[in-house]
Amino acid sequence: MSVTYHIGGTVQAEEVATLYRRAGLNRPVDDLARIGRMIAGANLIITARDGDKLVGIARSVTDFSYCGYLSDLAVDPDCQRMGVGKELVRRTREACGDEVMILLLSVPTAMEYYPRIGFQKDDRAFAIPRKR
């Protein structure tokens, strides 16, 4: 397997939905129009591909100056434990710069993963949940 990484570029809603589904992310994968809006609204997308197949994505919203929200980090199960997620986060950090704090909300099953790749747990976060 030869994984290549790309900043920006074209990514299709269908392939992102497939990746989210395979990776177990709770996203609106049956609503491709909404996935398309999620892609369009992100201003930093880093992808990992094995040939033409999307095997990883880091989708963020950032001002490239102070804050960045890493809203999706997904890696195909066949590529997990190979450093793909860690590399997507490293490239996200590099693209945002040292002045930017990267924030994310973890799925319960990944709570032990993020500290291993450099994230610090923070108990000061608050959220207003989405209605759908």
Image: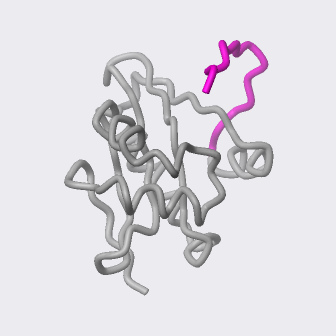
At x 44% / y 26%, what residue is drawn? 68
Q: Report the front residue among 58 and 89.
A: 58
Task: Give the side of residue 76 with respect to residue 41, left or right.
Answer: right
Q: Is residue 77 left or right of residue 45?
A: right
Q: Which residues lie in the magenta part? A: 118-132
How many badges with numbers are in the image?
0
In the image, residue 32 above or below residue 87:
above
Q: Residue 55 in magenta?
A: no
98 relative to 44, above or below: above
> Residue at position x 61%, y 21% from top?
130
Q: Is residue 125 magenta?
A: yes
Task: Please determine whether, in this image, residue 98 is positioned above or below residue 27.
Answer: above
Front residue of this view, candidates 84 and 45: 45
Query: Picture coordinates of residue 76 (x, y %)?
Result: 55, 68
Q: On the rendered structure, is 121 left or right of 10?
A: right
Q: Main secondary structure of the magenta part?
A: loop
Q: Residue at x 35, y 51 (%)?
A: 46
Q: Nearer the viewer, residue 42 or 2?
A: 42
Whole-percent x and y of residue 53?
36, 75
Q: Position of residue 118 (x, y in %)?
A: 63, 43
Residue furthest out toward the left: 9
